[in-house]
């Protein structure tokens, strides 16, 4: 009998439940009565405290379409894993203890970059670990796409579509702040899909003069409104030279918290155009996964079951050139996939006359 543990860690996103279901269904198909699935609550936190439970086949029914995660999730910073903190708990030792106590043969870890870092740490400690790439940010190294990303793109695109009506009716400049952490994938894709006029991402520090010029050019061409899709991690050329702390201090001194607020204030001051900010925030992570993400999640889950059947561990599932495959955890841990300068999507945006700042 195989005992397979599953946990979900980091920020939630659409497709977590679909992936859990995909893995469980494929495991039951392969092993029949010879598989037992153990759910670990709240990510690595449950592994540390020993919060796990036996799951039944019926637990995986009806969850394909559900957002969030039936297992709960938590952000547990990687540095917390390695050091014995004030509570004097050796987290790695506790996680190994739980793995042993639950009599696991392997553990599926669904999560983003932080999750994969800890997954690699556990693999190095001798546990049988498989990572599954989840995040709306699409910033996991070694995979073309992560589940959750395309649903978030769909949601962000709908936001941009809806904002268009206010922008055009009121002749306003609308600045939409989109998630993505340090990566611009979500903003770039939804910006193109929603027909944004200006797209600003962290990988290309913007020049405010160029942003203003792009708005004024649109106005001169008779377009009375403009839509900016701005990644939450975006910064300007001057800020690009600063360290994270210096940047935060500079923004605080200017009385703005985010790049989006600064951009909107500058536009209004310099152009005189009425400007508003829209922050869809966690809506981008909520609700049912899109059909694309359901298929991707099912593919990833089924592939994880195949890895279990082959007793192949220490790897993370990935999609490379439309083929589901895997990468060694050690190879991807600690890396992050940003939008490269030669990304064809950047050229596509430029060819549509979109200003990238
Ligand atoms: O990693 C997913 C993400 O939604 C990022 O896009 C965002 O920066 C971050 O999580 C927000 O984190 P939290 O939900 O902890 O505020």
Image: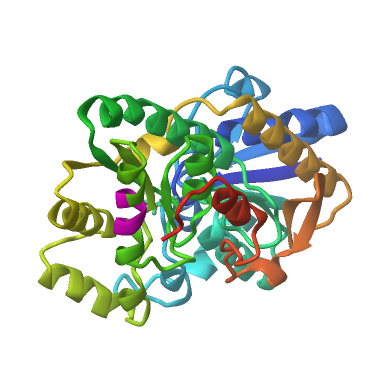
Q: Where is residue 328 in the image (x, y as percent from the top left)?
A: 76, 65
Nearest to the observer: residue 331 or residue 47: 331
Nearest to the observer: residue 44 or residue 94: 44
| Quarter of the figure that contains the N terminus | top right
Residue at the spot 23% in from the left edge and 36% down from the top edge: 172
Residue at the spot 41% in from the left edge and 68% down from the top edge: 205
**Left or right, 113 with reference to 221:** right
**Left or right, 91 with reference to 142:** left
The color scheme shown is rainbow
Residue 63 sits in quarter: top right
Nearest to the observer: residue 284 or residue 51: 284
**Left or right, 197 with reference to 224:** right
Above or below residue 67? Residue 324 is below
Q: Residue furthest right?
A: 310
Q: Position of residue 327 (x, y in %)?
A: 77, 61
In this picture, which residue range is highlighted in magenta?
212-216
């Amino acid at each position: 009998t195989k005992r397979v543990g599953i946990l979900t860690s980091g920020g939630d996103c659409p497709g977590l439940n679909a992936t859990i279901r995909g893995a469980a269904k494929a495991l039951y198909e392969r092993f029949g009565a010879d598989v037992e699935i153990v759910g670990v609550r709240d990510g690595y936190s449950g592994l540390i405290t020993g919060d796990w439970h036996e799951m039944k086949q019926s637990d995986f029914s009806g969850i394909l379409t559900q957002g969030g995660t039936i297992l709960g999730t938590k952000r547990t910073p990687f540095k917390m894993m390695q050091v014995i903190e004030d509570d004097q708990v050796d987290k790695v030792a506790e996680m190994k203890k739980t793995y042993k106590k639950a009599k696991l043969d392997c553990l599926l870890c669904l999560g983003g970059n932080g999750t994969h870092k800890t997954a690699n740490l556990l693999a190095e400690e001798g546990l049988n670990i498989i990572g599954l790439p989840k995040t709306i940010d699409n910033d996991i190294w070694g995979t073309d796409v992560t589940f959750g990303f395309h649903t978030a793109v769909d949601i962000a695109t709908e936001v941009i579509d809806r904002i268009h009506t206010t922008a055009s009716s009121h002749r306003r400049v609308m600045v939409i702040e989109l998630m993505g952490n340090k990566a611009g994938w979500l903003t770039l894709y939804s910006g193109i899909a929603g027909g944004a006029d200006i797209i600003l991402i962290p990988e290309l520090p913007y020049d405010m003069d160029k942003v203003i010029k792009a708005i004024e050019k649109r106005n001169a061409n008779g377009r009375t409104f403009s839509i900016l899709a701005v990644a939450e991690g975006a910064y300007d050329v001057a800020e690009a030279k600063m360290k994270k702390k210096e940047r935060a201090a500079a923004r605080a001194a200017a009385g703005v918290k985010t790049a989006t607020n600064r951009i909107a204030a500058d536009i209004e001051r310099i152009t005189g155009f009425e400007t508003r900010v829209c922050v869809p925030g966690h809506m981008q992570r909520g609700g049912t996964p899109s059909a694309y993400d359901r298929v991707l999640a099912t593919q990833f889950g089924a592939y994880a079951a195949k890895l279990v059947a082959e007793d192949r561990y220490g790897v993370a599932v990935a999609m490379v050139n439309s083929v589901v495959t895997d990468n060694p955890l050690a190879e991807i841990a600690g890396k992050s996939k940003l939008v490269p300068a030669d990304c064809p999507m950047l050229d596509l945006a430029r060819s549509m006359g979109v200003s990238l700042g």
